[in-house]
Image (cartoon, coloured by chain):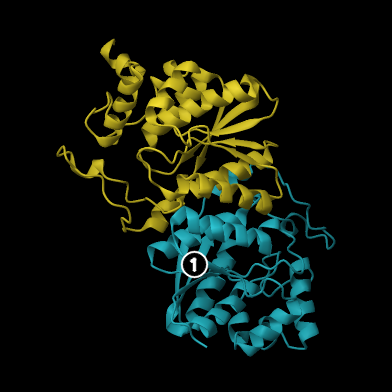
Chain colours: A yellow, B cyan
Amino acid sequence: MSVEKKALVVLSGGQDSTTCLYWALDFFGKSQVETITFDYGQRHIMEIASAKKIAAIANVANKVIPIDTFSALGGNSLTEPNIPVENGLGHSNQLPNTFVPGRNLIFLTYAAAFAYQRGIDHLVTGVAQTDYSGYPDCRQETIAALEKTLQLGMESRISLHTPLMFKSKKETVLMAEKLGALPALGFSHTCYNNSYPPCTICSACQLRAKGFAEADITDPLLNRYNHG
Amino acid sequence: MSVEKKALVVLSGGQDSTTCLYWALDFFGKSQVETITFDYGQRHIMEIASAKKIAAIANVANKVIPIDTFSALGGNSLTEPNIPVENGLGHSNQLPNTFVPGRNLIFLTYAAAFAYQRGIDHLVTGVAQTDYSGYPDCRQETIAALEKTLQLGMESRISLHTPLMFKSKKETVLMAEKLGALPALGFSHTCYNNSYPPCTICSACQLRAKGFAEADITDPLLNRYNHG
C-alpha cells in the first residue's frame, strides 16, 4: 500500500528504527522515503556507521545532523538509574552521562524542522512505550502532544508515525521479517558495550536476543559473525 | 510578591528577555532566578555579551549553552520572507540563513531539560504574539501545547511563563520601567545590523524606537551612546 506522500524516518541505526524504515518503505513507497540520523556524541561512531550502511542497503538518502548540546546541558548529573553492572564491564554499561530528559523531543523537533524545509509531512520514529525503554518522551500521550505542538509551532501538517508504539520486541521482530528488514538488521547496532561482535551479555543485547528467540527467528546480526 | 519557587529565564540579551528577567526577579524573588542563553552562531558575539552583562547587572547566574545544529538543519533555504533591504545595507539586514522553523520549540525544550536537572519548575520566556514577530512558535496556543508536551515528556511539573505574550512594545517598555529594568536595557542588543551604537534604521531598531517613543521614555541604550 502506497499513499504517495513523502516521509522522513529517524534512523538511529538500531533495531527499532531500522524496522521502521522498512515499514515506511512499504507504507509510503520506496521512492518517497528519506532518513535522518543524529550525531550527538554517544556511541556515535558505530550507530552512525550502522545507520549509513542500513540506508545504503535500503537505497534511501541519509542526512546526519550534529547535536553538540547534550553534553553542555547534561553536565555531570546522571538523572536516570544506572543499568546494573552485572557483568563487570563497568562504566560503559551505564546510560551515557550526556543523557538529557526529553531528549527524544529534541530529536523529533529537529527532524520536523528538517522535514518542513523539504516539504515532507510524515515523520516516522521507532519509539515504543512497551518493553524496556520506559522513557516518558517515548509514550503515545507525549508523542500526540508533541505532534500538536509541532503542527502549531511550525504551521505544518506534520504527522508523527510510531509503528512500534504498542509492539513487544517479539512482534517487532516478526514485523521486520514480514517487511524484509532482516538483511538490514544484520547491520543494526544494539550492544551497550559497543562490542563488535555484540557482547551478548549487556541488557540491550539480552533484550534483543529475547525478542528474536520468542519470534523463533535467528538474529541476522549474530548470523553475520557466526558465518564470517 | 514572591512565591518561593525557582525560575529559569531564557535570556537572549534582547529587550524582551531582559524585561522578562526583571519580571522574574520581581515575581519569584531575587535569589530564586537564574538564566540560560543559547549560542547558536547568529549575531552571537553581541547577543551573548549582552546577556552576560545583563545577568551580571541583575546579579543572577547565567549559563551559555551551545547549539551547532541549526546551520546543518537549515541548509541554504531561507524559508521566511526577507526583511526588506530598504537602506542599502544588504545581506546583514535579512533573517539569518540559519533560521529553522520551530526554533523556539528547541530553545524551550533545551531550557526545560536544563531546568529539570536543576530542580527548577518555572521557565520564563519573552515570546509575544503581538507586534512584529509573527512566528507561530511564539504564540500562546503553541506555548500551551509545548508546556503539556514537556510535562508529559519529562514527567515534570514545568510551567512556561510568558509575561509579554499579549503586550505591545509600548506596554513592554512601561513594564520594564516599572520593574527597574531600564539600566539593564541599556546593554540589551536589538540592532539587525549588529551596529554599536545601533544603526537606528533597521526594522528592529525602528520597532524598538517606536515602543520607547510611545511609552514616552528615553531608550537607555541610545542614552548610553549619547552620553559617552
* Image quarter hosting the N terminus of chain A: top right
- Relative height, residue B123 to residue A177 (above, below): below
Q: Quadrant of the C terminus of chain A?
A: top left
Q: Which of the two residues, B60 or A185, is positioned nearer the viewer here?
A: A185
Residue B136 lies left or right of residue A147; in this view the side is: right
Task: Give the letter of the chain under mark 1.
Answer: B
**Residue A189 in the image: x percent, y percent?**
37, 29
Instruction: Name which residue lies at 30% across and 34% down.
Output: A204
Q: Quadrant of residue B16?
A: bottom right
Vertical side of B215 occupied by B101: above or below: above
Q: Residue furthest top?
A: A227
Q: Secondary structure at mark 1?
A: strand
Horizontal and vertical percent position of residue B17: 60, 72
The amino acid type, in three-letter code, at marker 1 is Ile
Residue drawn where x is 46% and y is 36% of the image: A166
**Above or below, comparing residue A200 to residue A148 in the picture:** above
Q: Residue, x 55% and y 32% (percent of image)?
A: A9
Q: Residue at x 80, y 83 (%)?
A: B214
Number of numbered discs visible in the structure rendering:
1
The answer to whether A74 appears left or right of B142 in the picture is left
Q: Which residue is mark 1?
A: B36
At which x and y percent is residue B164? 66, 74
Name the residue furthest left.
A88
Of residues B12 and B166, which is closer to you in this image? B166
In the image shown, does A181 or A163 lie closer to the viewer?
A163
A208 w.r.t. A87: above or below: above
Image location of residue B174, percent across then percent down: 70, 85
